[in-house]
Amino acid sequence: MNLALPLRDYRTPFLLTGLSTSLVAAVLLSLATGAVSIPVNDVALIFLHKLGLFQHVPVDDVYDLVLTSIRLPRILMTVLIGASLGVSGAALQALFRNPLVEPSLIGVSGGSASAVVLVIVFGGAWAIAPGHWLYNSVLQLTAFGGGIVATFIVLRLSSQLGQTNIAVLILSGVALNALSGAIIGLAIFYADENQLRTFTFWTLGDLGGATWDKLLVAGPLLVGSCVALLFFAPALNVLALGEAEAYHSGANVERVKKQVIALTALAVGISVSLSGIIGFIGLVVPHVIRLGLRPDNRLVLPASVLGGALLLVLADIVARTVVTPSELPIGVVTALVGAPFFIGLLLRAKRKHEL
Amino acid sequence: MYQATNISYRIGEKQLLHNVNLTVVPGKFTAVAGPNGAGKSTLLKTLAQEHRNYQGEVLVNGKSARVYSPRELSLVRAVLSQNTTISFAFTVQQIVELGRHGHRSTRRENDDIVDEVVALTGLEAFRDRSYLTLSGGEKQRVQLARVLTQVWEETLFPRYILLDEPTSSLDIAQQQLIFALAKKACSRNIGVMAIVHDLNQAVQFADDLYFLRAGKIIASGEAHVVFTKPVIEETFCCRVNIYRDPCNNCPYIIPERETFSEPRSVAINL
């Protein structure tokens, strides 16, 4: 892949710095708001304390506890999941050569979710129960597996002579989502009272379960898969010409496809295992970025990392504040924004006779 | 040379190519003509290594094409497929730059090559236009520019471009332009192989001409020698008359009206 090609867009640095600054601001705002609101200067003070500075200024213990053991892991997880979903959406759109693709829409998230649900309900039979030291890893691994299987099925179903048949693609998504809905329904049928409540929130997306323990394994994996996906930008650019053309241009198409599918399934699968299904981030973010700028993936992918994180942090602030002290499921918030956006895209595509 | 030796290719029971021998010589324009379904595109895809489970051997500059990696092969040959659809709003400049994907050249070298090809193909005014807003002829010119960019720089080894009906659905001016550009590439030690639908264009531009029917080469040779009434009638099962352009003595054909001849079994020796 040739990295010596210029990006040729003077807005690139502005966009990336703008997104980074907004993300930092949103994270600070998110740390300060919630059922217990913590003034921003106290937030700063607590961080300085951890670094061994300003020890003579007293810190409110409640603030400290809320911030370090509840809010910080939650917001870190939100950032990582938002980034993963954003960049996975952008990468899958490039891979399928269609801007309407999104992990939850084409059934990748559903594949991961049904795998996770099966482990939660039936894992007890193999002594894999909450509390077991391997429990979280097993959940994440099966989520990854479910995501990979779903992506391969969709890719096989929807590709015709190296081109993506968009009707078949969307319908495969419908079929896979119906199937994973059935599997989740089946699991719910066998679930006990406790699991039942967990599922209901989890299938709507839930960022509330974040702990440092969970992030220990999941965090590096999410960061790793996001960063790795960025390196595929040149290959995904040339793939926009079509699979045969990408091969003629020197790309190892089969390898690129497999690696991008594995990485997106990893990013989406781990995200789903942490927070359930959060839809539309991967659809909205790359789209908004492409609206202003050209679809060069060397720009769209990193901007989707930042944009995805930003959007999910903002959505999380909304979810936590509109009905305090309770909170809305995050999936409800993203779907309320994302679904009308998707309908708008469909209308536009229909008007341009692209469907 | 880009050489197909005894290429056979089948999908299931269907034999699409049958012992095909073809040579693309650097600096020459080689055209392949034949009726629909003759296996022309299959031949091109086999040469390009898009189909790999063929029998026989494809030799690229004396080395078996099978041992080249996709990247190595992309430095030697570029391919223009029949229809390239793009669903993202890349600019013309970006599409042409994609031709440099497999190269390890510096930004400056890339820019120089892209600039040169963009000027040659008359695309300067379109550089920043979205590819999606272009007309069919403009799109095809952009794709040709991308393909030329891929093999444009002078190297020690000869390069090749393979064009699959590059002018289908273009008006005559655009058609002439595309072929003239391909012909220009020949002067840079590039061998051009093109599937050409219009026989008159084939004989006008080609140095070597191959006639393909039902996966077999019916006749091949120097364009002006092999372009004869019996060969064309045998290939296309259609009666034609050959005339000569009074200005440049180039032959051209006009098919006869409403006559169908049965495929003849006479062997044609040239």
Image (cartoon, coloured by chain):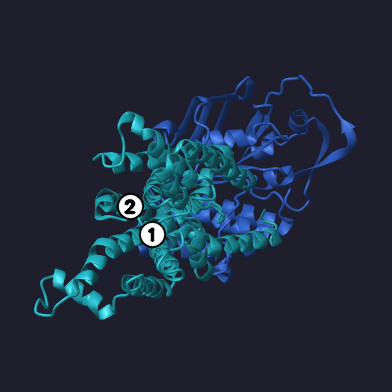
Chain colours: A cyan, B blue
* Residue A118 rendering spot, x and y as whole percentages: 42, 36
Which residue is painted at 36% across and 48% down in the image?
A270
- Which residue is depicted at the point 61% across and 61% down? A345
Tell me: B233 left or right of A279.
right
* A50, A294: nearer the viewer: A50
Tell me the chain of label 2.
A
Q: Quadrant of residue A32?
A: bottom left
Identify the residue under disc 2.
Answer: A222
A29 relative position to A57: left or right: right
Pick whichever, A216 or A93, lies toward us: A216
| Picture coordinates of residue B58, whole percent (x, y) | 48, 31
Question: Of A157 and A120, which appears nearest the observer?
Answer: A120
Whichever of labels 1 and 2 marks the residue nearer the N terminus, that label is 1
User: Residue under circle 1?
Assistant: A83
Amino acid, disc 1: Ala
Of the 4 image quadrants, the one containing the C terminus of chain B is: top right
Residue appearing at x 54%, y 37% in the figure: A156
Quarter of the image for residue A68 reads bottom left
Left or right, A350 with reference to A290 = right
Residue drawn at (26%, 67%) of the image: A67
